[in-house]
Image (cartoon, coloured by chain):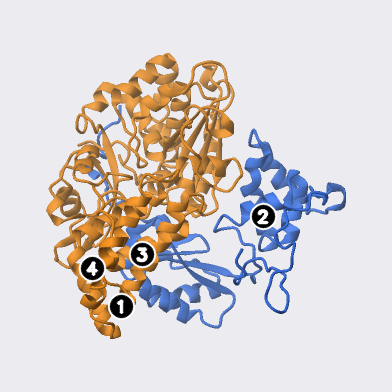
Amino acid sequence: MSTGAGRISVPRFAHGSRVPGWDDAVDLTKDPAVVPDPATTPVPADLRREIEAAMARYPDRHSAAIPALHAAQAVHGYCSPTAITQVAAIMRLTPAYLTSVASFYDMLELEPRPRHDDVYICTNISCSLLGADELFDAMVAAAAGDNTVHVSSFECLGACDIAPMASVNGEYVGPLVPDDAQRILDDLRAGTPVLPEKQLRYRRCVDATEESETEDRT
Amino acid sequence: MKKLLFDRIDEPGLNTLDVYERRGGYQSLRTALGMSREDVLSQLMDSGIRGRGGAGFQMGRKVSFLPQGDMAKYLVCNADESEPGTFKDRELMQKSPHMLVEGIVIAAYAGGISRSFIYIRGEYQLQADILEAAIAEAADAGYIGEDILGSGLSMSLVLHRGAGAYICGEETGLLDSLEGKRGNPRLKPPFPAIEGLYAGPTLINNVETLATVPHIIRMGGAEYAKIGTETSTGTKLVSISGDVKRPGNYEIELGIPSREIVYGLAGGPPSGRDVKFWFPGGSSSPVLTKDDLDLPYDFDSLAKAGSMLGSGAIIIADESRRVLDTALKLAKFYAHESCGKCVPCREGTNWTHKMLQRITTGEATPMDLDIMASVQTQIIGNCLCVLGDAMAMPIGSMVVKFRAELESEIEAARARSGGADVEDVVALGVADEHAGPLPVH
């Protein structure tokens, strides 16, 4: 076992040798992590309703783990120990199980962050061919020192037709130029829709079929 | 060619039930419910439609693999569109969600399935909201639920939002994720058709495949099979991006020359430069060069040329682009997305990324290209799923096809960093010992 940064630390003597017992198997007499007691775990009523509704949608309640963690994250800001305990109490699962799920997915956060706006810049192949790296640098520079905006790069958001693009709080905008970085921040601060003329939701399909307008579909 | 999926796709309000029904929507469902289960299945078989998600397996055969009999069977629509370069399902779900819902109900009927799920990637919030509304409308109108249109068929449909993981687009990873676990792929066999979601028989298909089903029922399988080529029937949505004038989704007839898509529809590189290399089927397909542009765009022709049609996502890079930049992006992406379950993929993607970085810092020698090529061959076919292959195939093809360019990159970077002469290092005699065979495509 390595003792490098981020790993479990192994107890050592001053001269460097590992203290005997460091590699003992798990303590079989110790109680395993248990499902939190619903009676002593307070959960906001809205969150409880949402998680119970999610569980009812699936034949197996485990399937509701991701929707439930999403809901808890929306309430608590991230998947905090409290959030995980609350979900565990309602879903009758162990916190360890839910942590294993939450740590796998990019959209579930295990580290606390201040409330913020999310700006994801796609830096995958198509976007980077068309200048995503410059856009990302411009966005980072524009948002420097503002901890209400969280800028990060993202790998393919599935909108290469508007490359280079960004997802601002889930709203897809593009194609962008580096100057748009400041405009995105201005719109966020003003609380107005972000770059409305560049939003994907209003974009028409390039493969428009005007010629078949008059044809009747049988 | 008459458009099927993209017929008047921008019609305002097409995402609502009213407009969709006015255009003849859900008529195919009525037709299908009037037929026997076996007839619907044989229409799907006759159509010859191959899966649009990447693997290209015949959909009708997949349905026929489901065991018969009274048991809990599931249908899962794979809407976790995360293959870099692919964005066709996004447009389809956003603009014509009912087409997908109708296709799902028909496919469920053909397979004797009573529970269906759509697994949509977490980033597609707008599309998920639109689909959710469409499902609610369809349920109110009696197209989903108990005793659909008085036929006795019952089916539920649940939209499940993912949480950001490329691996969940792989079918068994998706199943684990849908079961509420980490999205690790499973060993196959058993294939999902025998043992899938909740260990029950499961039919998994891509959004585009399922959205085509209503058209197959409307036209008849045999009529649909007349579109395209003999082994690649029908129309295909192609997402084209990168160095082209008009990037976006186009519906094409399978088998047309690739040049017609790249130049005819998308307008070619805006700079007027030539195409240098292109991905014909998403970032995991081996790259092709401008000499391959006359290949017919269908499953078999691209496979014969050593690449694949994959998800139908074409990425174009013009002559001014460096192969190394794209290779680095690719390797970094797959190293991040590898779930870590299988060693060749977990280690291979990371090593490839590090070796490519060594090229940029001037630490690499041409010998590294041989090692890199051998790493790729050791990944392919040695893992539970094809995520590792998805990096190994394009990187392997880049090393073969652009070896001279990569070698000059290596030497230029060495010169910049003041490294030793390449000859000195190779002369040590380690090159032959470590170099593996080049990948065979």
- Viewer-side label of 4, 3: 4
* Circle 1/circle 2 CB separation < 8 Å: no
Tell me whether marks 1 and 4 sit on the same chain: yes
Q: Residue at x 70, y 47 (%)?
A: A50
Q: Disc 2 to disc 3, how far (Cα)?
A: 30 Å
How far across and how far down the image is residue B314, in percent?
27, 52
Q: How many marks?
A: 4
Q: Disc 1 to disc 2, how far (Cα)?
A: 41 Å
Q: Disc 2 to disc 4, how far (Cα)?
A: 43 Å
Tell me whether marks 1 and 2 sit on the same chain: no
Q: Disc 4 to disc 3, how far (Cα)?
A: 15 Å
Residue B338 is left or right of residue B55, and the answer is right
Q: Residue at x 18, y 57 (%)?
A: B267
The furthest residue to the bottom: B418
Subunit that carries the residue with mark 4: B
* Residue beneath disc 1: B362
* Residue beneath disc 4: B406
Residue B334 visible to an observer of this rendering: no
Tag 3's secondary structure? helix
How far across and how far down the image is residue B351, in percent?
40, 63
* Residue beneath disc 2: A99
* Residue beneath disc 3: B329
How far across and how far down the image is residue B207, in percent?
41, 39
Identify by letter the chain in orange.
B
